[in-house]
Amino acid sequence: MLATLLYSPGDVRCEEIAEPTIEKPTDAIVRLSASCICGSDLWPYRGLQDIESPQHMGHEYCGIVVEVGSAVRTVRPGQFVVGSFCLSDNTCPHCRFGFQSSCEQREFMKGAQAPLARVPLADGTLVATDELPSDDLIPSLLATSDVLGTGWYAADAAGVQEGSTAVVVGDGAVGLMGVLAARQMGAGRIIAMSRHKSRQDLALEFGATDIISERGDEGVARIKELTKGVGADSVLECVGTEQSMQQAMNCARPGGKIGFVGVPHGVQFDGQTLFFQQKSLLGGPAPVRRFLPHLMDLVLDRTINPGKVFDLEVPLADVAEGYRAMDERRAIKTLLRL
């Protein structure tokens, strides 16, 4: 079968590899209905993360189980399943406290940009639907496996609650899912920081009440202006750069909370600043498995439609601004239907 491998920065290849097989009794083999490219794939692609050997790509996935190991009890062949990028047993102490992304047996999913994928720790990682979903729901179920679960965790970690003011830093797929999550959690005001028209439009559709295009100090000043000098109760940091983290910190009010899910690269905080600002930080790898059953229910009953995030067409000028090394085909193709 053909699979996607990353050899070095900018060097992505589709190659013929052997089909996956059951290696451990806790494994499952899934035929992928849909997979996609993740923003975190761009870090090694752009050379900001070391690549020691060819990497099998793909950790956002959903599909139909074709085979299970002898120890698997909760899923069976023929079921449609969604899994998380963090593989977990869902039984260890960390999992029981809702942090499956820190499972004592944690592994990270790979190899889902292919027709078939091996999913370790299948019982703890995969969640099955009662029936096979209709084709139009597949993109939204795919979104639950990572971007929606990650955006939801950003809102959860930031303590979004009924009537609160939330700021979302970042307008990529995770940031847009953070907007959707904040709306579902009842935020009274949701301020999306975005400079791209198509993303601004989708943010408004997902529930944003205000759009701010400024960044850095100007962006923070606009947040303070909109909140009468107070700042936001909750800030969702969905990028992971030094600038975005500082912007998130400065947008939150004293006593506010910052949920950070952008993978940090080169981010540093001054200790005295952290001490005197009195703001809470919680984040890291999203425990998507904690939220999967609820998010899948919201999709299946058509309460939300997060799959729209895959329909975005990014203007080439905007692509060039952030990813000049990427060619046109790779920049625009964000959803791979298998």
Image (cartoon, rainbow, N blue to C red):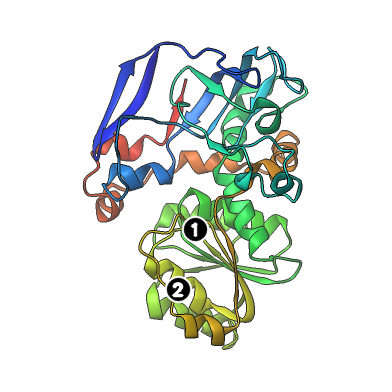
Secondary structure under tag 1 reads loop
Label drawn at residue 238:
1
Q: Is residue 77 above or below residue 135?
A: above
Q: Position of residue 10 (x, y in %)?
A: 23, 38
Q: Quadrant of residue 232?
A: bottom right
* Residue shown at the point (52%, 51%) measured from the top left: 174
Position of 32 with respect to 91 (left or right) is left
Q: Is residue 184 above or below residue 85?
A: below
Dot 2 or dot 1: first in sequence order is: 1
Residue type at numbered disc 1: Cys
Q: Cα distance, mark 2 to mark 1?
A: 11 Å
Secondary structure under tag 2 reads helix
Label drawn at residue 247:
2
Q: Is residue 55 above or below residue 242?
A: above
Position of 54 with respect to 250 (left or right) is left
Q: Position of residue 329 (x, y in %)?
A: 28, 34
Residue 206 visible to an observer of this rendering: no
Front residue of 159/285: it is: 285
* Residue shown at the point (40%, 71%) measured from the top left: 268
- Total marks shown come to 2
Q: Position of residue 31 (x, y in %)?
A: 55, 16
Position of 154 with respect to 330 (left or right) is right
Q: Position of residue 135 (x, y in %)?
A: 61, 23
Residue type at numbered disc 2: Gln
* Residue shown at the point (56%, 41%) measured from the top left: 146
